[in-house]
Image (cartoon, grey):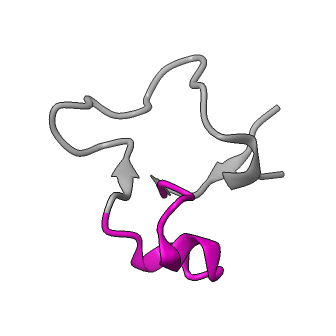
Amino acid sequence: DRVAIEPGVPCRTCSYCKGGRYNLCPDMQFCATPPVNGSLANYYVHAADFCYK
């Protein structure tokens, strides 16, 4: 299925993540910043709770 994804995945363990403010996570990992080349592929594995159909 085609879905929209949240481009950053938080750590889910810091106080910001546990408080529901994952956008402030200091350990956020993005799918298109070096050394990651991005997600333009036929298939891409991403955290399910950050995918929206």
User: Residue, x 22% and y 45% (percent of image)?
Assistant: 33
Left or right: 47 in relation to 3: left
User: Residue, x 60% and y 26% (percent of image)?
Assistant: 45
**Residue 39: image x %, image y %?**
43, 32
- Location of residue 32 (image quadrant): top left
Asked if residue 51 can be seen in this view, the reply is no
Query: Is 18 included in the stretch rendered in magenta?
Result: yes
Left or right: 40 in relation to 53: left
User: Residue, x 75% and y 37% (percent of image)?
Assistant: 2
Residue 41 in the image: above or below residue 8? above
Left or right: 23 in relation to 45: left
**Residue 29: image x %, image y %?**
36, 49
Asked if residue 18 can be seen in this view, the reply is yes
Please state which of residues 11 and 45 is positioned toward the viewer in this rendering: 11
Please state which of residues 42 and 47 is positioned toward the viewer in this rendering: 47
Locate the N terminus and report the quarter of the image it occupies.
top right
- Location of residue 52 (image quadrant): bottom right
Query: Is 50 included in the stretch rendered in magenta?
Result: no
Across the whole image, how many numbered discs are drawn on residues?
A: 0
**Residue 31: image x %, image y %?**
38, 42
Please state which of residues 8 and 21 is positioned toward the viewer in this rendering: 21
- Location of residue 3 (image quadrant): top right
**Residue 30: image x %, image y %?**
36, 49
Task: Find the residue positioned furthest to the left.
Answer: 34
Span shown in magenta: 10-26
Please state which of residues 26 and 49 is positioned toward the viewer in this rendering: 26
